[in-house]
Image (cartoon, rainbow, N blue to C red):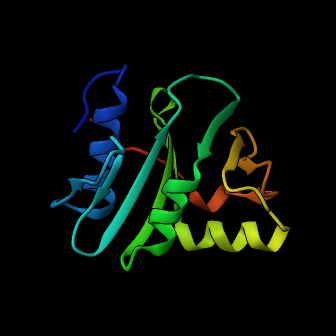
Amino acid sequence: MIETDRVSSKQFVQQILLEEFGQGFQRRGRYPYMFENKNRLVYFQNFNAAYDNAWYRLGSIARQILATSSKESYVCFTIPVENEYYLIPYKDIEKRAKNIGWKRSDIEVNIDRLRSHWRELEWDLVDCKKRLKLA
């Protein structure tokens, strides 16, 4: 369990992996925060600042890896300094992007944290928002 007020992104990601999915994950490929085990692929993006808005980008190569994986795939947008994260099944992201007509290869992610709203995909993420249990 994490015991400090100021936690690193790496520690935060490791704790989320453990609490949400258990052990046995290895880093995948060139992405420092993409992990897999025999059943799941999880891609983390971190925004470690205490702002009302959190910004991320799902690049086209990461999207392709997540979309073509035979494993259950997730994206986790984290805000370690605020002890928050949004855990989203990747298939739901692609479904939402298709439904609103997103055409670009990268997906911009601008989350209004006060409302848990993903602006670009016009998506309410309240059900995806979580807090890490600290010691």
Of the 4 image quadrants, the one containing the N terminus is top left
Q: How far from the left and from the top, in percent, is residue 16?
A: 34, 49
57 or 123: nearer the eye?
Answer: 57
- Location of the C terminus (image quadrant): top left
Number of labels in the image equals: 0
Where 74 sits versus 111, above or below?
Answer: below
Q: Residue at x 30, y 34 (%)?
A: 10
Residue at image position (28%, 44%) is: 15
The image quarter containing residue 9 is top left
- Where is residue 118? Give x, y as percent: 73, 50
Extreme residue in the left direction: 24
Based on the displayed image, in which of its 4 quarters is residue 38 positioned?
Answer: bottom left
Given residues 101 and 72, the one toward you in this image is 101
Is residue 68 visible to us here?
yes
Q: Residue furthest bottom?
A: 70
Q: What residue lies at 79% left-to-right and 50% top-to-bottom?
A: 120
Q: Which residue is drawn at 46% across and 74% down?
A: 68
Nearer to the camera, 82 or 13: 13
Question: Relative to residue 89, is residue 78 depicted above or below?
Answer: above
Q: In which quarter of the image is residue 72?
A: bottom left
Q: In this view, does 108 lie to the left or right of 130?
A: right
Residue 19 shown left or right of residue 86 in the figure: left
Res. 87 in view = no
Image x and y of residue 128, in percent = 58, 59
Q: Position of residue 108 (x, y in %)?
A: 70, 46
